[in-house]
Amino acid sequence: MLNALSGVWRPLARTRSFGPDLPEVESASPATTRRLHRRAIGIARFLADSLTATPRARQRAVAVIRGRARTSELRARTSARRRLHRRHVLIRLTRDRAIPISVALVVLIAAGVSLAPAAGPVGAVQAEAAAAPAGVRLTIGGGAGGPNEFDGPMTGDAAAAAPIDDGTLYKPVAVDTSIASSVGMLRHYTVRNGDTLTSIANRFGVSMMTVWWANHFTSKDSLKAGEDLVIPPVSGLVVTVKVGDTLDSLAAANKITVADIVAVNELTDTNLVVGQVLVLPGAKGAPMPTPAPAPKGSTGGTGPAPRVTGSWAWIVLGSNNYISQYFHYGHYGIDIAAPSGTAIVAPTDAHVIFAGWKSNGGGYQVWLHLANGLYTTMYHMSAVTTSAGQDVLKGQRVGKVGMTGWATGPHVMLEVWVGPPWDSGSYRVNPMRYY
């Protein structure tokens, strides 16, 4: 019975009137809705009175119908409110100020959908996973085929890299482009007045030619006060690696061993890099150019030199000697290298005005007064064999070759003065004009 009445009530609750051509309830006013509701209740009572046998049954039927009517009315009102709310939100979203926000929401939703993993159909057959390669390819800071790519098992920090579809692992790390160089081993020295290549080399415990090669000198006159010089840590050459250079080729070209290069430069990687600076211990460069002797009569100094009769005796005896440094700016004499202890003689007849030690960098030395206002000074002797006030003849022994004072090897330095060496008006001239 209740089901039958409910079946009568449902179509009545869904319509505004009992006519088939009338509009839906949602578009009617609240008064119309209440009027139709009362009419539906009246019809329900009529049907309940007609179709039920007892008053109690009729009451129960009417109560059920009323309850279901209220439920249907509440559902209808809720649905109407939801539709009105959706319309209100739509109107707000289509206003000018809300359009950018709406667009942003649409973009965010679309991005979320695109990033979501595609779900396969339930029950679909999945493709069998491809077998992993024997050696995972690792690319550091580059792509496939790049210079930093290699094939091999993944080790170390590679485990933190993210795989991609083809098995390549890309690790976003910076490539180390630093070059192991020995530039930090090179020392620097500022030239002072009175310095010579020999004195500077002696101060740092390297050969004079090492200083020459390291600073790319081409002339003895290149040394000037205030100049910054590069001083290698050991005697030898300083080279910059060029294309094609290897430790073996550098060692062979300079007649030294690879082990010495590695040890001096403290190399941990024997693969050389173009531009890398290395010190080659014991290597030798081009010999110092030998200038032509100054013609007789030229001064080589700041004023005219007196003429002398006859030639001077070479002051170092024997044949095992040579000029290791010539007269030039900053070095106002000549250095004659010879074995230590070799005899040194007077260049001509002279009077000894000093013989002994001086703290001027020359060590043991002898000063001679020659004819025509000339004087000679001879430095770095290992021994003095004459004394002040003595007269000596040409070729007479006055001392022995040594390396006292500022010297890096056994030699004697010969200076020729026009005027007494202690006189401020005197000056030095090139000794080679007298030979």
Image: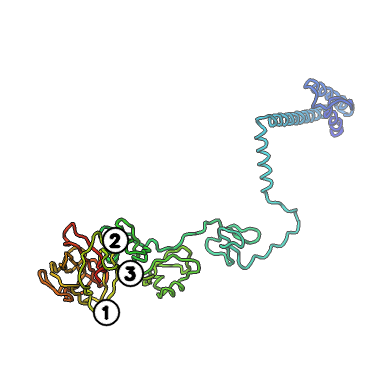
Whole-Å distance between the Cαs marked 3 and 1?
Answer: 20 Å
Depth check: 46 or 129 in front? 129
Depth check: 326 or 348 in front? 348
Labelled pair 2, 3 in contact (Cβ < 8 Å): no
Left or right of 236 in this view: 402: left
**Quick check: can you spot residue 144?**
yes
Q: Amino acid at mark 3?
A: Ala
The tag earlier along the polypeptide, 2 or 1, is 1
Task: Identify residue for label 1.
Answer: 319
Counting from the top left corner in percent of width and height, residue 87 is at 73, 30
Q: Residues within 10 Å of mark 3 (few under 14, many from 20)?
A: few
Q: Amino acid at mark 1?
A: Ser
The residue positioned 19% from the left and 67% from the top of the image is 376
The residue positioned 21% from the left and 60% from the top of the image is 427
Task: Identify residue for label 3.
Answer: 292
Q: Residues within 10 Å of mark 2 (few under 14, many from 20)?
A: some
Front of the two marks 3 and 1? 3
Q: Quadrant of residue 251?
A: bottom left
**Quick check: can you spot residue 401?**
no
